[in-house]
Image (cartoon, helix red, strand yellow):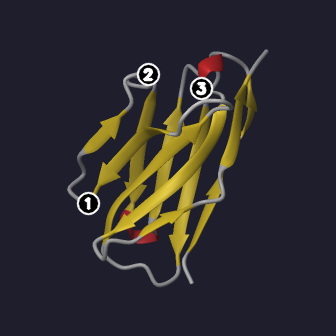
Amino acid sequence: QVQLVESGGGLVQPGGSLRLSCAASGSIFSIYAMGWYRQAPGKQRELVARIFNGRSTNYADSVKGRFTISRDNAKNTVYLQMNSLKGEDTAVYYCNVATSGVDNYWGQGTQVTVSS
């Protein structure tokens, strides 16, 4: 059984910071990439950030310069440091893990609300 445990979401004021964590456990080998997606009400799900086994990264244009994705390979954990948060960042954030065995796994999602 594969499980992705997410944490770090919550309510924050504009300009504030949050750090999301996602720890993968279970029978997962050869992780190809780990990343974060988000979906706001009435909008399509979008890629926020992704980090590959070669350490390259992708970021949505809307978060470049504000968000940083990182990995702890020994713990199979991915982090998303979110700084200078805006109201437009409000969404449910989903952790994603892709394996070299062509499997995709998703977390349950964690709510991030940016509001004063």
Marks 3 & 2, CB-CB < 8 Å contact:
no
Asked which secondary structure carries label 2, the reply is loop
Considering the numbered disc 1 on the image, is that residue within a helix, a strand or a loop? loop
Q: Earlier in the sequence, mark 3 or mark 2?
A: 2
Q: Work out whether residue 50 or residue 65 is closer to the camera in this orientation and state it.
A: 50
Q: Earlier in the sequence, mark 1 or mark 2?
A: 1
Q: The residue under label 1 is which amino acid type?
A: Asn
- What is the crowding at mark 1: few (fewer than 14 residues within 10 Å), some, or many (at least 20)? some
Q: Residue at x 75, y 19 (%)?
A: 115
Mark 3 falls on what kind of element? helix
The N terminus - image quarter: bottom right
Q: Nearer the viewer, residue 62 or 14?
A: 62
Check disc 3 and give the amino acid type.
Answer: Asp
- Dot 2 amino acid type: Ser
Residue 71 point in image, percent of width and height: 40, 55
- For the C terminus, the image quarter is top right
The residue that mark 1 highlights is 53
Q: Is residue 86 visible?
A: no
According to the picture, the residue beneath numbered tag 3 turns out to be 89
Image position, residue 98 (x, y; %) = 38, 64
Measuring 23% from the left and 46% from the top, which residue is drawn there?
56
**Could you tell me which residue is drawn at 73 percent across and 20 percent down?**
13
Task: Write down the residue under mark 2.
Answer: 62
Residue 3 x, y percent position in the rendering: 59, 73
3 or 1: tag closer to the N-terminus: 1
Q: Is residue 74 left or right of residue 81?
A: left
Residue 25 placement, left or right of 55: right
The mark closer to the camera, 1 or 2, is 2
Q: Whole-Å distance between the Cαs marked 3 and 2?
A: 9 Å
Work out whether residue 22 can be spotted: yes
